[in-house]
Amino acid sequence: MPPLPLSILLVFLPLSLVTIGGGQSAIADMHRQIVEVHHWMSATQFVDAFAIARLAPGPGSLLATLIGWQIAGFWGAIAATIGIFGPTALLIYGVAHIWSRFEGARLLLALEKGLRPVAAGMILASSYVLIQSLEGGWISRCIALASTALLMATPVNPLLLIGGGAGCFVGLHLLGLV
Amino acid sequence: MAQNHMKDALAERPSALQLFLIFTRIGLTSFGGGLSGWLLREFVQRRRLMSEEDFLNGLSIAQALPGVNVTNMAIWIGYKLAGRNGAIACWLGMVVPAAFVIVLIASLFASLSSYPLTHVALVGAAAAAIGLSLSMGLTAARRVPRRVFPLAIMAATFVAVAILKLPLLWTVLVAGTLSVAVTYARG
């Protein structure tokens, strides 16, 4: 068995290259590897970390950093961060470097359009997996759907919405409903 | 040189340290996405550090390539403005300070974990936060062309990842390659 931070690095390195359309798309697979394959976290811990990552500022993929930190402390956080950001950082760096000599407009367009349905399918799959891991039965699922509807219909501040979800759930809990 | 004439219209190039600080500020004040518009305002409209065309080229590449769009943009902008050091500075500014903050916030929650309500609040927060994922997924799904092939690719990706739990890497390689190849062949 390699040391834990190395195992973490090896889990996140390939995940980096499938974060198409943003870090959201890799969450389903992150969940599979962290919770189901390696048993590094429980499903509940994973969803808690997801909530915290959404409350915190910065790129959403810092969820990986947080997971690394919770599994293996400082070096775990470093390993996960390098894993999830490293390969794609080198990729865009390489493209920026050769871009001036690269006549890739048509290929780029095909890449962008062609990956659209794949990214959509992955992000929807991530939401599905997260809803499945959510505690609190149908009430928390209703909160998730209400929040989705609010986000799509109004320019609501996401931070306020997450705070509202927390407050709402605590209120229902205190009333003995959940 | 033509390039130098173009540069005259733009402001003076920032140093790597200045770029680091700009991205630190953007990284620490950004919540829940929508950052591309913010970057456009900061670098093109307000500071006039790069042309709109350069920026939009970078944006479509950042979106097409894997990786978080904003960290991809950070590297693109940094490279355009200050070469290798600029790319490194922008990336570090975007990721490192925010990484410290997220660990700090998590530690704060951990220290409150002896109160049962902390976990209850986090479940509620997670439920609302899932809305961010789901609404992004639905928005992305709405942008998929209403033709049989793209819709089938989207559905197959969803089933492979959510239901069959196939590894993401292989799903993306197969579905992505197929989809890009067909799109390219169509022109």
Image (spheres, coloured by chain):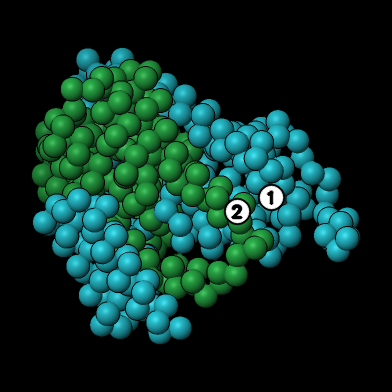
Q: Colour of chain B?
A: cyan
Residue, x 88% and y 60% (percent of image)? B1
Q: Quadrant of residue B187?
A: bottom left
Up/down of B51 relative to A109, above or below: above
User: Which quarter shows the C terminus of chain A?
Assistant: top left
Q: Position of residue B14 (x, y in %)?
A: 77, 40
Compare residues B87 and B38 and report the one nearer the observer. Answer: B87
Residue, x 41% and y 32% (percent of image)? A81
Up/down of B70 relative to A85, above or below: below
Q: Colour of chain A?
A: green
Chain of the residue on which disc 1 is drawn? B
Up/down of A69 relative to B121, above or below: above
Which amino acid does the dot numbered 1 rest on?
A: Lys
Task: Give how far apart the Cα atoms at labels 2 and 1 are.
Answer: 8 Å
User: Which quarter shows the N terminus of chain A?
Assistant: top left
Residue contact between numbered discs 2 and 1, judged by CB atoms under 8 Å: yes
Query: Would you call the spot at circle 2 few (<14 residues within 10 Å), some (14-19), or many (20 or more)?
Result: many
Residue, x 32% and y 44% (percent of image)? A14
Image mark for residue B63:
none
Residue position for label 2 = A96
Q: Position of residue B51 (x, y in %)?
A: 73, 60
**Dot 1 lies on which element?**
helix
Q: Position of residue B29 (x, y in %)?
A: 55, 38
Image mark for residue B80:
1
Q: From this viewpoint, is residue B41 visible?
A: yes
